[in-house]
């Protein structure tokens, strides 16, 4: 029976025929204290048999508000194209609607999963959708691109880290080359040539230049002496400050500015606009992610970034901004810069392997080597007795883009991709739409054997958590995180209060891949305000965790699943061991959400996680604190 205080929420369901084409409105009655996930379950029940083949958790809900009139479908389509609010499964409805929703309006857009079932033929509509995103990008000339107009014109079509978006899969999960790059920033041992080039770069970056063109010319000159030629030709009618291209593949884009002061443009953002133009040259039905490196500099500062096309095109900084101010440039800074330079050389060669280009491809001869700052300055560089390399003459002989400046740099000549490297063909050829998922498609089982899997779908739009298929009958969950307690999870799994754990693997760039049992969300539910028997079962499960000496740290409604058994008993599964660990060792992150999530008063950012904190949060599941 529905309570008089229940919300009546009108919804529309997206059809399979066309994006944003919807059914007639329908309504569900639900408690304002229910979660969005519980709303999904009621929508699935209301729309029988349309949604019988879809798990409730696979539905995506967006908050809209349109009048139920003759222009309903046009209004829905217009609102959906303006990126409405995504409703997270854990959100409480009275936080979404502080007062009952109006009955003359439609408030929820229901979107079924668009990914095909495993083994199905790829429908062309998804590839067209991806191409449509590229075509929808309004052309922004790189020289005029700034934060404001990019945010206004390219919102939800291009991601550059401002603001943060949890729904975009990080670049380092999309491609192994970027994970290697980040790892090299800490572990690569620079060569003497790396250090010498870092010193040469510092010498040139510190000096003021009369024009932006002169600074960019000198950067291309010194870069060729170290690594490879950079072409200052055009990409789609826009001249670049330098890029490295082999065949139809762009391996690196550079963007430079004269000085910081008085500059209104962001060189990284402008490099991103060149990358969008690069994508415009690619085939519409391409499935490659088109990884590309970016170097951007402004005055005496230098940064390294990457670009990739996953579900949407994105760019991301891979290093901090290095500054070549004399007072700040220490031996530690020199080591960091040398490592970044060496990581770039290695990554460029891996990109060559990725794209399958030949090391003998000749670079274009359109590079502008004219107009040195002065004959004396060029002579100073050429006669430096400490340099074991020379700047090119004004008419350099064309050479391979990847001819090493130092033949001893074996990492450039002998790189072999890993057996599961990120190539234009995905490592698992059965994977539909590889650009929608991370590149990692295997794990090592308990017997030491390699187990391949295929991504089925993303379980939550704001978490790197995926439903995958390993065999005909084995479905698993693959989670990517940067912190995880394998010991706490295994302790709980051994006692039957956590999903079975298949593997925990450390990846480069700080990522951890967790492979675990898949729990059917149609069988399990969040505890919510259930019976005393449910509360007792959850309390006992938490005691089992604590008896092992562990703490959880985030024991909320969304991290506990229950399934009712016979005789009012419940099967309890604890999830999300990211913050877990031994009591006394485990500490909270420094970015906890206190705004709309209950935490005990003694919880502190970076503070120690206590078992009594877990107990308080468990109580809050069943008797929420006002």
Image: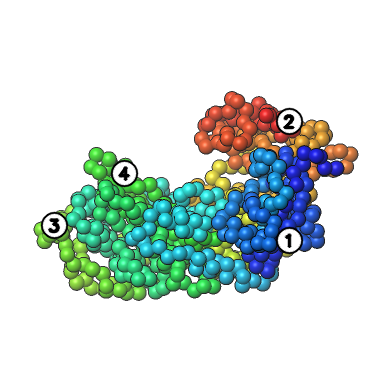
Q: CA distance from mark 2 to mark 3?
A: 75 Å
Res 471 visible: no
Residue 492 or 613: which is nearer the viewer?
Answer: 613
Q: Earlier in the sequence, mark 2 or mark 3?
A: 3
Label number found at residue 333: 4
Q: Nearer the viewer, mark 2 or mark 4?
A: 2
Q: How is the image coloured?
A: rainbow
Label 3 residue SS: helix
| Mark 2 burial class by Cα count in 10 Å: few <14, some 14-19, many 20+ | few
Q: CA distance from mark 4 to mark 3?
A: 26 Å
Residue 263 or 616: which is nearer the viewer?
Answer: 263
Q: Residue furthest front?
A: 70
Q: Position of residue 165 (x, y in %)?
A: 52, 50
Q: Earlier in the sequence, mark 3 or mark 1?
A: 1
| Residues at discs 4 and 3 in contact (Cβ within 8 Å) | no
Label number found at residue 623: 2
Q: Earlier in the sequence, mark 4 or mark 3?
A: 4
Q: Is residue 164 left or right of residue 341?
A: right
Question: In this picture, is 299 found above or below 529?
Answer: below
Q: CA distance from mark 4 to mark 1?
A: 62 Å
Q: Is residue 444 left or right of residue 560?
A: left
Q: CA distance from mark 3 to mark 1?
A: 74 Å
Q: Position of residue 24 (x, y in %)?
A: 73, 61
The residue indicated by pointer 1 is 24
Label 2 residue SS: loop
Q: Nearer the viewer, mark 4 or mark 3?
A: 3
């Amino acid at each position: 029976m529905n309570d008089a205080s229940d919300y009546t929420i009108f919804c529309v369901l997206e059809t399979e025929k066309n994006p944003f084409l919807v059914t007639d409105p329908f309504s569900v009655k639900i408690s304002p204290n229910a979660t969005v996930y519980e709303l999904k379950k009621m929508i699935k029940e209301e729309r029988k048999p349309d949604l019988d083949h879809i798990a409730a958790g696979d539905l995506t809900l967006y908050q809209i508000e349109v009048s139920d009139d003759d222009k309903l479908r046009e209004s829905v389509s217009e609102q959906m194209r303006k990126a409405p609010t995504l409703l997270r499964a854990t959100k409480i409805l009275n936080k979404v609607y502080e007062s009952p929703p109006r009955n003359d309006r439609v408030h929820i857009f229901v979107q079924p999963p668009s990914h095909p079932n495993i083994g199905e033929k790829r429908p062309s509509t998804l590839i067209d959708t991806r191409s449509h995103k590229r075509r929808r990008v309004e052309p922004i000339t790189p020289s005029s691109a700034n934060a404001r107009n990019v945010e206004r014109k390219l919102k939800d079509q291009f991601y550059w880290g401002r603001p943060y978006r949890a729904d975009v899969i990080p670049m380092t999960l999309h491609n192994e080359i970027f994970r290697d790059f980040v790892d090299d920033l800490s572990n690569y041992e620079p060569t003497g040539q790396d250090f010498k080039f870092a010193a040469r770069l510092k010498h040139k970056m510190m000096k003021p230049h009369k024009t932006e063109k002169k600074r960019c010319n000198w950067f291309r000159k010194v870069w060729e002496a170290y690594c490879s030629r950079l072409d200052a030709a055009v990409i789609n009618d826009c001249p670049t400050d330098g890029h490295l291209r082999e065949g139809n593949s762009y391996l690196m884009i550079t963007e430079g500015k004269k000085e910081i002061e008085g500059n209104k443009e962001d060189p990284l953002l402008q490099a991103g606009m060149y990358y969008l133009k690069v994508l415009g040259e690619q085939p519409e039905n391409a499935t490659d992610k088109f990884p590309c490196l970016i170097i951007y500099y402004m005055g005496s500062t230098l940064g390294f970034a990457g670009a990739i096309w996953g579900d949407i095109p994105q760019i991301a900084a891979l290093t901090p901004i290095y500054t070549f101010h004399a007072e700040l440039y220490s031996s530690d800074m020199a080591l960091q810069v040398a490592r970044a330079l060496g990581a770039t050389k290695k990554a460029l060669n891996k990109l060559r392997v990725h794209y399958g280009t030949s090391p003998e491809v000749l670079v274009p001869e359109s590079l502008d080597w004219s107009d040195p700052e002065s004959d004396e300055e060029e002579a100073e560089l050429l006669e430096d007795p400490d340099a074991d390399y020379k700047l090119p003459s004004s008419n350099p002989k064309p050479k391979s883009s990847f001819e090493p400046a130092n033949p001893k740099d074996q990492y450039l000549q002998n790189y072999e991709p890993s057996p599961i490297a990120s190539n234009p063909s995905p490592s698992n050829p059965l994977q539909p739409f590889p650009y929608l998922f991370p590149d990692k498609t295997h794990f090592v089982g308990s017997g030491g054997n390699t187990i391949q899997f295929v991504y089925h779908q993303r379980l939550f739009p704001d978490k790197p958590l995926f439903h995958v298929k390993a065999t005909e009958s084995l479905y698993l969950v693959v989670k990517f995180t940067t912190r995880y307690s394998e010991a706490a999870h295994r302790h709980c799994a051994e006692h039957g209060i956590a999903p079975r754990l298949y593997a925990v693997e450390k990846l480069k760039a700080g990522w951890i891949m967790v492979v675990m049992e898949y729990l059917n969300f149609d069988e399990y539910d969040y505890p919510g305000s259930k019976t005393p028997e449910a509360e007792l079962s959850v309390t006992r499960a938490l005691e089992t965790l604590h008896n092992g000496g562990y703490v959880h740290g985030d024991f909320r409604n969304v991290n506990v699943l229950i399934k009712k058994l016979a005789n009012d008993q419940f099967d309890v599964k604890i999830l999300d061991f990211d913050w877990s660990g031994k009591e006394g060792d485990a500490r909270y992150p420094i970015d906890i959400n206190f705004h709309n999530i209950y935490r005990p008063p003694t919880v502190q950012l970076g503070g120690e996680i206590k078992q009594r904190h877990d107990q308080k949060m468990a109580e809050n599941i069943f008797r929420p604190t006002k």
